[in-house]
Amino acid sequence: MALTAVPTPPAEPTLLQLQTELTVIRAQHNDMALKVRRHELLDRARYEIHLAQLARRVRDQLLTASSRHAAILAADAGVDAAALGRALDRIMRATLTDLSARHGVQ
């Protein structure tokens, strides 16, 4: 019959090790709190909301750009303003659809 080694349980951490670990964790917590107060860290949820709002404003501006500028462009080019507006709108929508598809935006 072969003798097998009995595993020894892991040593319990000493009080000094636990106090040191607690001090390190408190220092890390204080450092993070200071960074938050200094605005060096961003709240991800707020950042994503802000970014989505900005993207919507840009999209809305791009979608209305064709109707706002079609008459001026048509007068300069000597073409029908309504037809140019429709063409610009179609191109802008296709471009925005392509961009959203590439970046996985709904």
Image (tube, rainbow, N blue to C red):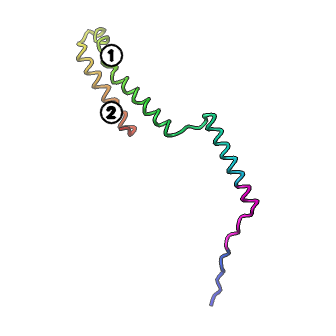
Q: Residue at x 64, y 83 (%)?
A: 4
- Rounded to the nearest angstrom, the CA distance separating label 2 from label 1 is 20 Å
Q: Quadrant of the N terminus?
A: bottom right
Mark 1 secondary-structure assignment: helix
Percent across and percent down for residue 65 are 34, 19
Is 38 on the left or on the right of 56, as rendered? Answer: right
Q: Amino acid at mark 2?
A: Thr
> Mark 1 and mark 2 in contact (Cβ < 8 Å)?
no
Residue wearing tag 1: 68
In the depicted structure, whether residue 43 falls above or below residue 84: below
Give the residue type that dot 1 points to: Arg
Percent position of residue 94, x then y: 30, 30
Q: Which mark is residue 97?
A: 2
The percent coordinates of residue 18 (x first, y second) are 72, 59
Label 2 neighbour load within 10 Å: few <14, some 14-19, many 20+: few
Instruction: Report which quarter residue 66 is drawn in.
Output: top left
Depth check, mark 2 against mark 1: the one in front is 1
Picture disc at residue 79: none
| Magenta highlight range | 9-21
Between 76 and 53, the residue placed more toward the observer is 53
| Residue 83 falls left or right of residue 92 | left
Return the residue nearer the eye: 65 or 101.
Answer: 65
